[in-house]
Image (cartoon, helix red, strand yellow):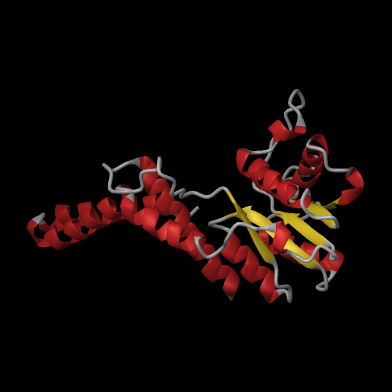
């Protein structure tokens, strides 16, 4: 997968080769640029600002403000799972998927009319992620007749495509995903002809009084945050075509 770490490694190899051929003096500017970019990506303040600004494009869903006479399809996007048989379904879901599901259930419990839609396939032809998420939702108190599944999608674009194929474009949709991922999911729904309501979860940046989002020493966590932002921008650009 493309990441900033890959670019840094390629840059280091490239500059190292140039230094070997021409000496370090003729490559001082390149070393400065790579070093500066590395510090910007690993000292938290800039990654935090970029991610916080992007996540702020979507606001927390407030079901009490919606039309309570309508039926809403709450589409919980997939994000990974395991099929460890000794675990309950809630523990078989990756933490990201479980948090999305919990947000979907929070919204569902405040709406008189809803369908909870789980989605995502199985890479190995086993029980699908959609099915495990359905079992987890039932364990958390959602009636099985209130749950629909999309068992074939392998990515966000396919999840939207599968929803439209099964339910059409006239349903009122609430799409649940990570705050960093939701602008792309909403954009894909819009391309498909649906104005989906975003329901963000898994915020990477929280800004409470006990959260520090200022400058730090270089860290892998900050680089990972910048990687997440960088990859999401690339995916948005790709899916928008």
Taking 225 as reference, is 191 left or right?
right
Percent position of residue 23, x then y = 10, 55
Q: Is 202 located above or below residue 85 in the figure?
A: below
Viewer-proximal residue among 28 and 101? 101
Query: Can you name the residue that lies furthest to the front here?
Result: 64
Q: Is residue 101 left or right of residue 7?
A: right
Q: Work out whether 175 lies above or below 85.
A: below
Where is 5 relative to 219, above or below? below
Q: Residue at x 79, y 62 (%)?
A: 162
Residue 155 seen: no
Q: Quadrant of residue 164?
A: bottom right
Q: Is residue 75 left or right of residue 238?
A: right
Given residues 14 and 102, the one toward you in this image is 102
**Which of the pair 225/142 is nearer the observer?**
142
Q: Who's the residue at 54% across and 63% down the image?
A: 235
Outermost residue to the top: 86
State which quadrant residue 114 falls in.
bottom right
How many numbered markers are drawn? 0
> Is residue 240 something that shows in the picture?
yes
Instruction: Please tell me which residue is depicted at 44% across the width and 57% down the height of the picture.
Output: 52
Where does the image place residue 37, in percent across and percent down from the top left?
Answer: 27, 57
Quarter residue 168 falls in: bottom right
Quadrant where the image shows the C terminus: bottom right
Instruction: Give the residue at the far right of this rendering.
Output: 145
- Towards the viewer: 167 or 49: 49
**What is the x, y in percent for residue 160?**
73, 64
Percent from the top left, x then y, of residue 239? 59, 69
């Amino acid at each position: 997968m493309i990441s900033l770490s890959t670019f840094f490694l390629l840059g280091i190899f490239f500059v190292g080769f140039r230094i070997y051929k021409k000496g370090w003096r003729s490559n001082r500017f390149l070393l400065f640029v790579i070093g500066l970019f590395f510090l910007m990506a690993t000292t938290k303040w800039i990654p935090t600002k970029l991610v916080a600004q992007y996540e702020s494009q979507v606001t927390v869903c407030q079901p009490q403000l919606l039309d309570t006479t309508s039926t809403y399809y709450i589409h919980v996007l997939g994000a990974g799972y395991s099929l460890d048989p000794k675990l309950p379904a809630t523990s078989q879901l990756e933490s990201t998927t479980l948090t999305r599901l919990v947000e979907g259930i929070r919204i569902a419990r405040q709406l008189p009319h809803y369908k909870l839609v789980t989605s995502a396939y199985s890479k190995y032809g086993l029980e699908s992620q959609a099915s495990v998420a359905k079992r987890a939702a039932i364990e958390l108190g959602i009636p099985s007749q209130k749950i629909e599944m999309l068992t074939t999608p392998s990515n966000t674009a396919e999840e939207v495509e599968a929803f439209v194929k099964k339910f059409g474009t006239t349903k009122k949709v609430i799409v649940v995903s990570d705050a960093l991922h939701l602008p792309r999911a909403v954009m894909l729904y819009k391309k498909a002809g649906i104005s989906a309501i975003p329901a963000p979860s898994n915020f990477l940046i929280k800004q409470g009084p006990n959260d520090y989002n200022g400058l730090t020493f270089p860290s892998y966590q900050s680089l990972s945050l910048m990687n997440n932002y960088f990859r999401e921008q690339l995916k948005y650009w790709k899916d928008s075509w």
